[in-house]
Image (tube, rainbow, N blue to C red):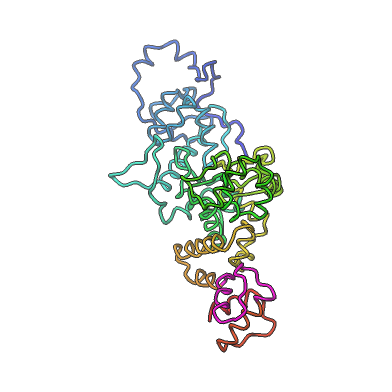
């Protein structure tokens, strides 16, 4: 983190040997039989009161006593620290290094000396875990990396905000709260906690959750599939026939045969390689930066300019990552949520904009090429998220902000049918006004398009 404590100091004042283990003071080496007779300290409390001074452990009163690997093992056992620490060889220095990578992020000086700051950091990490992973008498947290499915406790978000991320900006909060379980695997529960703990505005939270659900299916950060049949490509892209014509003739022939004969998976003549060739060609044609900059992450960041925009916003928050050379890093759990929030900021989603968001506006922000079905599914996921959070008033309000639904309503009474594309242009305005007039609803002067959509959906 920002600050590193300099010269933490401790009882361990000796120099490390080549093995990385603190060497014993000479006076103890001269009396090995006394050391061997000393009772084993299991578990060790390590509740030290002073950096570089004597501790309160009655078994260990000499200020020159060195903390051994065995004693660090005892700390790990007593506080139920993760078994990932075995890769650090369990020295004090490596314990400090590990603690600095956790959400507690104490900013310890990794000097290999045990003092009050290290002791406090271990206690803080234990409290953090106890809040995140509540257990019952019949249930224990799986320290070997088993997935934890128990939801966070009701007071967890208040605890995590006040204790660890209070006062930080949203993207920096998201960079601290993990979206993985103890094994490092993506966790839906962890993501929910991270979003709730980093994003203040409830509508913005739900917009993000809804977008993630539709863009990834809820399984964590993913890379956009690049295999397409012609029929699938035409649902996403324009100009598909032109791109098909640029493919090798045999590949194009198989793809076209399947399309003409409406063949589905399992019956197609085109191979997976054929469909990938079409997908890559379509992305190279349509995406800024081509196939290399296809969609990735929690909300499918796509295009070189978007990756660069996200990279710059992250850099502004002190998060350095080269997405130009390594766009796949937006799938990394360390950066996935901060990158998603950075993209929304780059796209212009402020708290104020979130309050006035609509179905079509969100679609244009996340994936302007997506059609009505995806746009409405995403919007319904946003509304469902608000309802799940108990915010029915805001959920009801968002249901009225659906341009597609308003256009469908207008088509029920107008002889002139309009395209249900979510775009409110001259023809849609005439149709929407005609619907309201037919319903006997007074239309305010100078009504905005957003207000017109709401008024139609209300009546």
Membership of 420 in magenta stretch:
yes
Closer-to-camera residue (155/443): 443
**Occupied quadrant, residue 205:** bottom right
Position of 315 relative to 418 (above/below): above
**Occupied quadrant, residue 331:** top right
**Tag count:** 0
Closer-to-camera residue (51/187): 187
Q: Position of residue 187 (x, y in %)?
A: 46, 46
Membership of 114 in magenta stretch:
no
Q: Is residue 216 left or right of residue 310?
A: left
Closer-to-camera residue (245/415): 245
The residue at the far top in this view is 30
Position of 336 relative to 399 (above/below): above
Q: Position of residue 351 (x, y in %)?
A: 62, 63
Closer-to-camera residue (114/64): 114
Q: Position of residue 132 (x, y in %)?
A: 43, 47
Position of 68 relative to 50 (above/below): above
The residue at the far left in this view is 138
Position of 201 relative to 292 (above/below): below
| Quadrant of the drawing holding the N terminus | top right
Is residue 242 among what the camera can see? yes
Q: Is residue 256 left or right of residue 192?
A: right
Magenta stretch in the rendered image: 401-428
Q: Position of residue 329 (x, y in %)?
A: 61, 40
Is residue 313 among what the camera can see? no
């Amino acid at each position: 983190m920002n600050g590193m404590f300099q010269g933490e100091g401790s009882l361990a004042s000796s120099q490390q040997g080549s093995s990385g283990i603190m060497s014993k003071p000479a006076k103890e080496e001269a009396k090995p039989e006394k050391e061997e007779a000393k009772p084993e300290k299991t578990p060790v409390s390590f509740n030290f009161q002073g950096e570089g001074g004597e501790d309160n452990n009655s078994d260990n009163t000499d200020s020159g006593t060195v903390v051994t690997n065995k004693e660090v093992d005892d700390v790990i056992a007593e506080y139920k620290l993760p078994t990932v620490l075995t890769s650090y060889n369990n020295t004090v220095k490596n314990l400090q290094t590990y603690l600095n990578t956790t959400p507690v992020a104490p900013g310890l000086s990794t000097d290999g000396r045990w003092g009050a700051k290290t002791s406090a950091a271990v206690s803080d990490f234990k409290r953090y875990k106890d809040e995140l992973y509540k257990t019952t008498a019949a249930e224990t947290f799986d320290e070997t990396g088993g997935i934890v499915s128990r939801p966070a406790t009701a007071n967890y978000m208040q605890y995590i905000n006040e204790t660890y991320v209070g006062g930080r900006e949203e993207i920096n909060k998201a960079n601290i709260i993990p979206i993985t379980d103890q094994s490092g695997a993506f966790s839906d529960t962890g993501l929910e906690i991270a979003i709730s703990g980093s994003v203040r505005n409830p509508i913005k939270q739900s917009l993000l959750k809804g977008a993630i659900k539709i863009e990834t299916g809820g399984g964590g950060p993913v890379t956009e599939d690049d295999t397409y049949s012609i029929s699938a490509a035409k649902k996403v892209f324009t100009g598909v026939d032109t791109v098909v014509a640029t493919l090798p003739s045999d590949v194009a022939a198989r793809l076209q045969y399947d399309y003409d004969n409406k063949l589905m998976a399992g019956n197609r003549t085109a191979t997976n390689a054929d469909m990938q060739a079409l997908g890559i060609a379509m992305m190279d044609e349509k995406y800024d930066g081509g196939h290399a900059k296809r969609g990735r992450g929690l909300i499918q960041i796509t295009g070189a300019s978007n990756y660069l925009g996200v990279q710059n916003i992250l850099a502004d928050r002190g998060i350095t990552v080269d997405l130009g050379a390594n766009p796949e890093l937006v799938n990394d759990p360390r950066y996935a949520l901060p990158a998603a929030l950075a993209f929304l900021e780059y796209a212009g989603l402020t708290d104020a904009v979130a309050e006035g968001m609509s179905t079509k506006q969100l679609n244009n922000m996340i994936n302007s090429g997506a059609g009505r079905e995806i746009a409405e599914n995403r919007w319904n996921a946003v509304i469902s998220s608000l309802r799940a959070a108990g915010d029915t008033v805001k959920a009801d309000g968002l249901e009225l902000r659906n341009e597609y639904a308003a256009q469908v309503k207008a088509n029920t009474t107008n002889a002139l049918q309009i395209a249900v594309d979510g775009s409110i242009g001259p023809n849609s305005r005439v149709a929407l006004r005609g619907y309201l007039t037919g319903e006997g609803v007074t239309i305010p002067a100078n009504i905005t398009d957003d207000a017109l959509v709401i008024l139609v959906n209300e009546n």
